[in-house]
Image: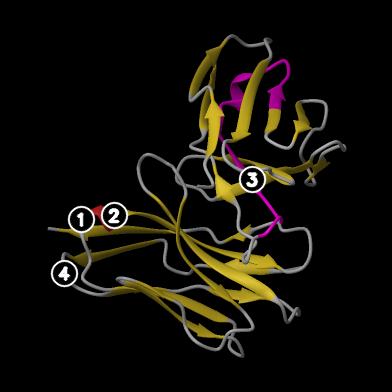
Amino acid sequence: GAVVSQHPSRVICKSGTSVKIECRSLDFQATTMFWYRQFPKKSLMLMATSNEGSKATYEQGVEKDKFLINHASLTLSTLTVTSAHPEDSSFYICSALTLAGASYNEQFFGPGTRLTVL
Amino acid sequence: AQTVTQSQPEMSVQEAETVTLSCTYDTSENNYYLFWYKQPPSRQMILVIRQEAYKQQNATENRFSVNFQKAAKSFSLKISDSQLGDTAMYFCAFMQFPGTYKYIFGTGTRLKVLA
């Protein structure tokens, strides 16, 4: 149980275009989802926290208009990188958390999406 | 604000030997969770072990165990009988509970198991 998927796993796009990344909790309802960015050989950097039905909470320094997050249902959150530029190239990871019936409050991670902007 | 420190950027260990990865954290809270995650080359984050701060007993999962010293704010991971498949990046993470459920990650330790 507790599987989180991300789609696509890899995406290459041209500078100036927008890219949408989906994060789905497959076998549980996620009250909260998190979006991270990871640079090569670095730690995960939290970008934002997304709660179903409400606006995402962004970490300091993360551009809200650049990284649009929508948590439309208890199993789906999307991250849209708008007007992508080469500096947005990175590995993006989502995680999901459920508070329902859990003994431990643990984030379950997706496999990540590698974004390359040409 | 809470912080997590992993002071060993890289480590190596011979296959079948034991290795300990260190993690210290800083918090003024009393209730929290601590985690060790493994990130292999596939980059999928895999939970290795977790510890609730209110539990004095150290958590163990097969070859993995922790030494949780709450007063010293230390949370080290011991890997026994190291295997080639243990080669990965290891991250220590802190989560305050209750709260925002955000993780605060350390900078990671790259572990290489040598044949």
Residue type, numbered disc 4: Ala
Q: Residues within 10 Å of mark 4 (few under 14, many from 20)?
A: some
Residue found at the far front of this picture: A101
For the N terminus of chain B, which image quadrant? Answer: bottom right
Q: Quadrant of the C terminus of chain B?
A: bottom left
For label 3, the residue is: A96
SS at circle 1? helix
Q: Magenta part of the protein: which range?
A: A79-101
- In the image, taking residue B99 as reference, residue A114 lies left or right, namely left
Could you tell which of marks 4 and 2 lies nearer the N-terminus? 4
Mark 4 lies on a secondary structure that is loop
Residue under the point 51% across and 35% down: A112
The percent position of residue B23, horizontal first and vertical second, equals: 50, 73
Q: Nearer the observer, disc 3 or disc 1? A: 3
Residue B21 magenta: no
Task: Tell which subunit mark 2 falls on.
Answer: B
Q: Quadrant of residue A71?
A: top right
Q: Is residue A118 visible?
A: no
Q: Circles 1 and 2: CB distance less than 8 Å?
A: yes
Q: Which residue is mark 4?
A: B16
**Label pair 4/1, CB-CB below 8 angstroms:** no
| Residue A80 in view of the camera | yes
Q: CA distance from mark 1 to mark 2?
A: 6 Å
Quarter of the image holding residue B77?
Answer: bottom left
Determine which residue is flagged by label 1.
B84
Looking at numbered disc 2 in the image, what kind of residue is underneath it?
Thr
